[in-house]
Image (cartoon, rainbow, N blue to C red):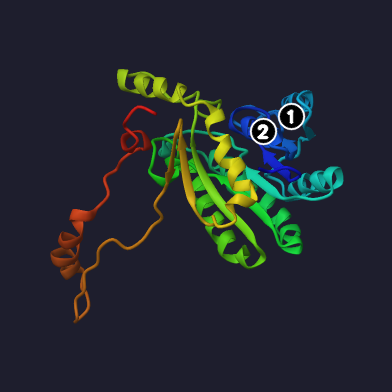
Amino acid sequence: MVAGKVVVVTGSGGGIGREIALLMARHGAKVVVNDIGASLSGDGKDAGPAEQVVNEIRAFGGEAAANTDSVADPAAAERLIGTALDTFGRIDCIVNNAGILRDRIFHKMSVDDWDSVLKVHLYGAFYVSRAAALHFKEQASGSMIHMTSTSALIGNFGQANYSAAKLGVAALSKSIALDMQRFNVRSNSIAPFAWSRMTSNIPADTPEEQARVERLKQMTAAKIAPLAVYLASDAANGVNGQIFAVRSNEIFLMSQPRPIRSVHRAEGWTPESVAQHAIPALQGSFFDLERSGEVFCWDPL
């Protein structure tokens, strides 16, 4: 479905990114495998993971190139897109998948915990997307695929930095879709459910948490890749500005914020009338403080 296309996949030295890179290549794409080889928290650097995936792709006859630039640096993001142009002559799709975790309960979250996660997830998605945007505009085609999370779309404990970044990614994707549609450039998001390095540190101290982890282990990273390959293909030309979730063999179209209920008072509002009228009228439609696992509470199919 993506034969001849050139695709950049960030954070593709392992996990979801690796599976997307491999399936893109199996479907004929030329892939730039980007990974700095850092720890889960973003420390260190190792060219090995990216090179290993490139070797896997070449072993089955595919074309790939490795890149170890950090998406959190705008100049490095430009070099990343440059790798695609220099090696394969064009760029057709980017998959913003790179990420780190610095989970902390909110009152213990440091400025560095906050800053580091936003720089990789949100700033990184912007930097790579922006570096590709002019090339997409000039050729009047291109697809951007961004990884968001149900931790952002629904909620989770101890992930204020990650959730804020990933909700920002979903909003960034929608803004890109609106701004770039006139140039035949598409932008969509995927919230992946998969057992990977990014989820391996989920607490499993209680029977409920242990059961959740066991459910997650059934959802392999390879299950995410088919939707990403589709979104990169010309078959997805009519799909733009959407948020999907993939959970094992299930694909969901996620809702986007819309008004669900309103109240009106002809003479305007006072704090007292808000308390007496507006909130009691709206309260029945309030959202519970739920986590992702409480909304997706059934076993993966």
| For residue 51, side relative to residue 15 (left or right) | right
> Quick one: SS at disc 1?
helix
Disc 1 marks a residue whose amino acid type is Ala
Give residue 250's position: percent from left, percent from top: 43, 36
Quadrant of the image containing the N terminus: top right
- Relative vertical location of residue 139 with respect to residue 102 in this rendering, above or below: below
Mark 1 Cα-neighbour bin, 10 Å: few <14, some 14–19, many ≥20: many
Percent of width and height locating residue 121: 59, 44
Residue visible at 39% across and 35% down in the picture: 157
Q: Residue at x 78, y 23 (%)?
A: 59
The residue where tag 1 is placed is 50
Determine which of the numbered discs, if any, sits on residue 12 in the image.
2
Camera-nearest residue between 280 and 217: 217
The image quarter containing residue 276 is bottom left
> Label 2's element?
loop
> Going from the N terminus, do you reach mark 1 or mark 2 first?
2
For the point 53% across and 48% down, the residue is 189
Q: Residue at x 54, y 38 (%)?
A: 113
x and y percentages locating residue 281 in the rendered image: 16, 62
Neighbour tally class for label 2: few under 14, some 14-19, many 20 plus, Cα within 10 Å:
many
Q: Nearer the viewer, residue 251 or 293?
A: 251
Q: Is residue 173 left or right of residue 281?
A: right
Q: Residues at badges 1 and 2 in contact (C-beta under 8 Å)?
A: yes
Quadrant (top left, top right, bottom left, bottom right) of the C terminus: top left
Task: Report the amino acid beneath label 2.
Answer: Ser
Q: Is residue 59 visible?
A: yes
Q: Is residue 219 above or below residue 252?
A: above
